[in-house]
Image (cartoon, rainbow, N blue to C red):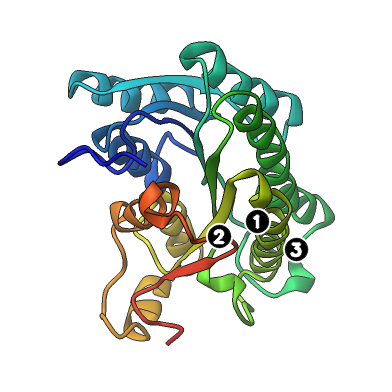
């Protein structure tokens, strides 16, 4: 544990972030760098990744980027390996990348859409976790992983049923990984965001006009989250200040599930 006065939450750590080109992932990459981490940003969107990495380095942080498609297991493993190639180790990872489904009842989703949602939101994080555990084990020895779930995984989700189901399965993988790798000093947790103002939610609003206002009205805080608010929770879970927290799915939802 780093006891240096005023040290950042992630001082001296190497962090890997998926879905880092925009939204929560980009906010997390910026925050992790401000908190002292050297960060590798991963996503499919090369131009967005380069822009965010450039912002971080211009602000005095350390960051690089790698193209990674969560639906392509080989590219996920290569991206994790790239973090070790660049920085010599891996300490923490935030598996944030995801894709949304077309909103609506489950019987309207096509087989291809079902497969895509599960490939990105469930298989992708599973591949990433296995690669990250191997990298942490081989380098830092101890570390932490956070998966980005959803508050929509914690109950019925009639508007995004397959998305919610994939995220609920991710919660189960998170718990299983926490029990499996805890004896090695590798903690695994998840955050479950409520409505957050990201490009993904904007896509949902375009497909279902009024959904942001409807969900906000159900929230005790009467607002949506800013992406950095979710990133702050992930940063704490990855840090040594959460050293006795593992297997948790932390709701960051403004009290909507209270």
Q: Mark 1 sits on what residue? A: 178
Q: Residue at x 80, y 50 (%)?
A: 112
Q: Nearer the viewer, residue 219 or 245?
A: 245
Q: Earlier in the sequence, mark 2 or mark 1?
A: 1
Residue 142 occupies which quadrant of the picture?
Answer: top right
Q: Earlier in the sequence, mark 3 or mark 2?
A: 3
| Residue 209 seen anywhere in this rendered image of the structure | no
For discs 1 and 3, the disc positioned in front in the rendered view: 1
Name the element at disc 2.
Answer: loop
Distance CA(mark 2)–CA(mark 1): 6 Å
Distance CA(mark 3)–CA(mark 2): 34 Å
- Indicate the position of residue 41 as horizontal and vertical percent values: 45, 28
Q: Mark 3 sits on what residue? A: 109
The reply to whether discs 2 and 1 touch (Cβ–Cβ < 8 Å) is yes
Q: Nearer the viewer, residue 115 or 257?
A: 257
Quadrant housing the C terminus: bottom left
Q: Earlier in the sequence, mark 1 or mark 3?
A: 3
- Indicate the position of residue 3 as horizontal and vertical percent values: 26, 41
Please give the label number shown on residue 246.
Answer: 2
101 relative to 160, above or below: above
| Residue 38 seen anywhere in this rendered image of the structure | yes
The reply to whether discs 3 and 2 touch (Cβ–Cβ < 8 Å) is no
Q: Is residue 30 left or right of residue 43?
A: left
93 relative to 105, above or below: above
Distance CA(mark 1)–CA(mark 3): 32 Å
Name the element at disc 3.
Answer: loop
Q: Residue at x 64, y 71 (%)?
A: 104
Mark 3 crowd level (few <14, some 14–19, many ≥20, 10 Å Cα): some
Q: Is residue 225 left or right of residue 84?
A: left
């Amino acid at each position: 544990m780093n006891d240096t006065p005023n040290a950042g939450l992630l001082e001296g750590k190497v962090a890997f972030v998926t879905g880092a080109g925009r939204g929560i992932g980009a906010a997390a990459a910026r925050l992790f760098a401000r908190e002292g981490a050297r960060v590798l940003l991963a996503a499919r969107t090369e131009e967005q990744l380069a822009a965010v990495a450039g912002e971080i380095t211009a602000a005095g942080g350390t960051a690089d980027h790698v193209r990674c498609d969560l639906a392509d297991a080989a590219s996920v493993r290569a991206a994790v390996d790239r973090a070790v190639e660049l920085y010599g180790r891996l300490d923490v990872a935030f598996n944030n990348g995801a894709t949304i489904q077309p909103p609506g009842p489950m019987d309207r989703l096509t087989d291809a859409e079902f497969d895509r949602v599960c490939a990105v939101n469930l298989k992708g994080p599973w591949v990433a976790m296995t690669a990250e555990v191997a990298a942490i084990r081989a380098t830092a020895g101890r570390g932490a992983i956070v998966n980005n779930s959803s508050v929509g995984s914690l109950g019925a989700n009639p508007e995004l049923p397959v998305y919610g189901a994939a995220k609920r399965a991710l919660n189960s993988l998170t718990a299983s990984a926490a029990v499996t790798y805890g004896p090695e000093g590798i903690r695994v947790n998840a955050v479950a965001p409520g409505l957050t103002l990201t490009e993904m939610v904007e896509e949902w609003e375009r497909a279902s006009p009024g959904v942001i206002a409807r969900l906000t009205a159900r929230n005790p805080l009467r607002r949506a989250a800013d992406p950095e608010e979710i990133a702050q929770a992930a940063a704490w879970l990855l840090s040594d200040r959460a050293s006795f927290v593992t297997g948790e799915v932390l709701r960051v939802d403004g009290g909507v599930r209270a």
